[in-house]
Image (cartoon, grey):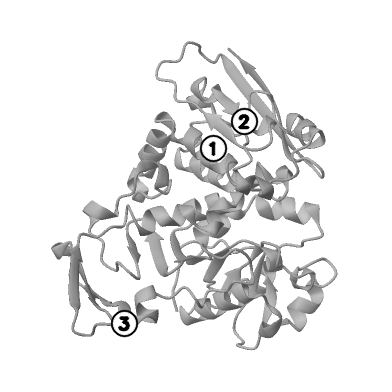
Amino acid sequence: MPTVRGRFVPSRLVDLESADEVRIQLDSDLKGQDITFAALSYRWGHSMPERIKTTSHNIKDRRLTGITMEDLPHTIRDAFVFARGLGVRYISVDVLCILQDSMSDWASESTKMAQVYSSAYVTLAASSAEDTGTGLDDYSSEISRHPEHGVILSFPPDNDVTATVTCSPSSPSSLRVYISAPSWPNQEGMKLHLDSLQTRGWALQERHLSRRIVSFSFPDLVFECRSARASSRMPFIPPAFARLPHHHRRLLDAPPDDRAAAVRGFLASARWQRLVSQYTNRGLTFDRDVFYAIAGLAAAVGSAVGGTDQYLAGLWLSTMPASLCWQRQTITNNWDDYSNWAPYSTAHLADARRRAPSWSWASVVGPAHTCDIARPVASVLGASCKTTHDPVLGLVYEGRERR
């Protein structure tokens, strides 16, 4: 049985003890137990059956009698089987663990996402899955599924090479050997950012916050933790090759003793602004989630710097006035992912303006382009925000700023 540090337990977890059915457990049911849990990062898509959603009306039955495995969508069912294989009994899945008919429960639970994903033993990410009907069982190595194409020979890390031996079925006497340096930065690592899951706004913080994450990125499994990266295609990745470009690195991937300095450097080098650009180019089904879906990441940054900075409606005080230099990105007919956002209408624009101060990128709907300013020509004399929860607008920031 794997163990984790820390005692945070989500308000609700799915109990995987039975192979035939799963039940919802409350944190109060698990008091005094040493709980290890996994988390699932995935896309609902258009295949989430209404009967699967946990609501205030069926939560009691789901605690007592549970849900049969056969009734679950393919992706969720496969994730449960994978978690059991890792020896993990509990898993957090939003559609089952948050009351989908209660805005107050959603507002409460969404603020805990930083703790859920950072405390999970492992996050399972359905990276290539378009929806819950896709499943995870087709994400085994392409080489393993088609052995006639070749086999990967793994060498010790200090050799810095891999070899693929291929034999053409049409010409058995033809044998080719390819030897190359590990290609993490240019292959598996980059490919994750082209996967379907990475068009989803919520998935950004889920990847950054997870201590360990296994991504089912067709045709490979890709593993990332705070100190290492690997994949089913490239199980040994020397440190010299494992480091991703800045815009693809995970924010908190640094030793605990160095994390505060690393995060301060992240803010000072304008990488938060670039992260905002990535985030706003992703889709949100409900634009009221714009602050909720990044709140966990903001909380993790604030914790890492020990309260020495101030989070203001999607910006950090230490990055002003440079972070004020943003503009709404022009939406073209070729930008397909914009269909994932809430309808682009006058009403939604008005809601956005009520949700955030005009100097915040969240005061517009859709993609925001941030700019790098080498030498600010102004200084911020002061800024402040207060937050409220609104059933229509979501998390609302009322802010003031003086320059």
| Residue at point 47%, 81% (across, down) | 85
The residue tagged 2 is 361
Which-is-in-front pick, marks 2 and 3?
3
The residue tagged 3 is 148
On-image quarter of the C terminus: top right
The residue tagged 1 is 276
Label 2, secondary structure: give it: helix
Which-is-in-front pick, marks 3 and 1?
3
**Alpha carbons under labels 3 and 1: distance apart:** 44 Å
**Alpha carbons under labels 2 and 3: distance apart:** 51 Å
Of the image marks 2 and 3, the number of the one nearer the N terminus: 3
| Residue at point 60%, 54% (across, down) | 113
| Residue at point 50%, 31% (across, down) | 309
Rate crowding at label 3 as few (under 14), some (14 to 19) or many (20 or more) other CA atoms within 10 Å.
some
Q: Is residue 310 visible?
A: no
**Residue 245: image tag:** none
Horizontally, residue 188 falls left or right of residue 60, namely: left
Labels 1 and 2 touching (C-beta < 8 A): yes
Rate crowding at label 2 as few (under 14), some (14 to 19) or many (20 or more) other CA atoms within 10 Å.
many
On-image quarter of the N terminus: bottom left
Nearest the viewer among 230 and 218 is 218
Of the image marks 3 and 1, the number of the one nearer the N terminus: 3
Picture coordinates of residue 361, whole percent (x, y): 62, 30
Check disc 3 and give the amino acid type: Glu
Picture coordinates of residue 203, whole percent (x, y): 56, 54
Q: Is residue 308 visible?
A: yes
- In the image as oriented, which residue stretches furthest toward the front? 170
